[in-house]
Amino acid sequence: MQKISTLFVALILILGKLSAQYSADMVVGKKNLDTRDSMKTASYPYILPIWGQKATNKGFNLPYSAGLSMQYIYQQSDIIINNLQVGFNNGPMHNMDQIVRFDNSVATSNGLNIRPDFWILPFLNVYAIFAKSKTSTAINAGVYLPDSSDTWHRITDINTKAEFDATTFGFGLTPTIGIGGAFLALDMNFSWTDIDELDKPAYVFIFGPRLGKNFKLKKKDQNVAVWVGGFRVKMNSGTNGNISASELFPTDQWGEKVNTGLEKVADGQQKVDAWWEDLTPQEQKNPVNIAKYNTANNVLSRAGNFFNAASEIVSNAGNGSIQYSLDKKPKDKWNFIVGSQFQLNKSWMLRVEYGFLSSRQQFIGGLQYRFGL
């Protein structure tokens, strides 16, 4: 089960952000009357944003219209996996629902994110996303079989961890407004993450509202912005992929896992059959006993077919391929974020952000350069 949740790499790579200087900010207050009056007749020298001249004359202090940022991103996120189907060497898919149960699955990643951005309108920033990361997925699960009393028993454990590379590309937009240093930003982005083990790139949508305040420092154009907000993840739930058998378990473990499974299935089938044969003809007509018997036989048959197919991997010394499909989702859709940005001048900015208060923790640290366009 090592890479069946590789889609969650996408969560690591497309974290929402304030993609430019915090906002177009309306200059207000009596002490800023002279500045506001001078802006009414000031000439705006750049092509972007559209209506930049009008916004400046209305008293909005605009950031430089273009920028390029680079960020380091770390994230750890719990995920939920179910509806698993597995096949071997492109053979039939086996429904493992209820048989394989995931205790916990954790995706962790370190990566670099590069984003060019542009203020298209005074209150709308758009950006592109390109990211590379090294990630790992740790999975703890168990294989379960029922007995004649419809009690499920854990027959073996699955504990694996995989490391792999991923590439993410996408785009985003941030409607935002600022008045007197306070600002509201509604960051949204759409991304696709390409991983060799997935049949197609994984799609993820991120929504990150932020509310903050900018504090001016003594030097001109130098300030510190702080904010709080949320981080919400929405993703396509279905995943299909193909991995090498040797990446799931070391070769010497395949025989042990498969043989243990076949023995447990045979033992379980023997106990269920013995229980059924010990029932009286009248008890065998009882709908409750019939349901228990049919359920146990169905599960044991599916488990037996699965382990028999897996035995082909054993006979090939652990070589072969595994196909899978599953449904997955983040354990928590939302987490809380706090962040800050230090603006050295209108061209250079440093920012940090931390997400917590859920099963997902994340950290972003980045450098941004802005210029007029």
Image (cartoon, grey):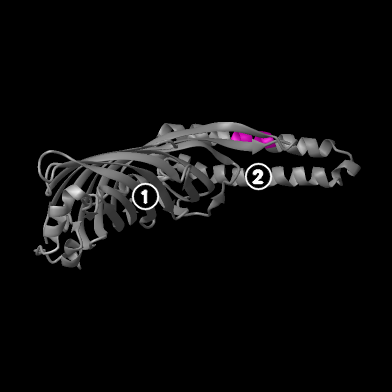
In the picture, measured across the screen, residue 38 lies left or right of residue 81, that is left
Residue 204 covered by magenta stretch:
no
**Residue 102 x %, y %:** 52, 38
Q: Quadrant of the C terminus?
A: bottom left
**Residue at the location (34% across, 46% down)?**
211
**Residue at the location (38% across, 55% down)?**
205
Instruction: Describe the element under mark 2 as helix, strand or loop.
Output: helix
User: How many other residues sit within 10 Å of disc 1, few (<14), some (14-19) or many (≥20)?
Assistant: many
> Of tags 1 and 2, which is closer to the observer?
1
Q: Which residue lies under the disc numbered 2?
A: 299
Instruction: Describe the element under mark 1 as helix, strand or loop.
Output: strand
Q: What type of secondary structure mainly makes up the magenta span?
A: helix
Q: Nearer the viewer, residue 108 or 369?
A: 369
Q: What residue span does the magenta drawing correspond to?
A: 262-268
Q: Nearer the viewer, residue 185 or 143?
A: 185
Q: Which residue lies under the disc numbered 1?
A: 209
**Residue 118 x %, y %:** 20, 59
- Circle 1: residue type: Pro
In the rendered view, tell whether residue 197 sits above or below residue 372.
Answer: above
Q: Nearer the viewer, residue 273 or 4?
A: 4
Of labels 1 and 2, earlier in sequence is 1
Q: Nearer the viewer, residue 353 or 333?
A: 353
**Residue at the location (50% across, 31% down)?**
256
Q: Are marks 1 and 2 in contact (CB under 8 Å)?
A: no
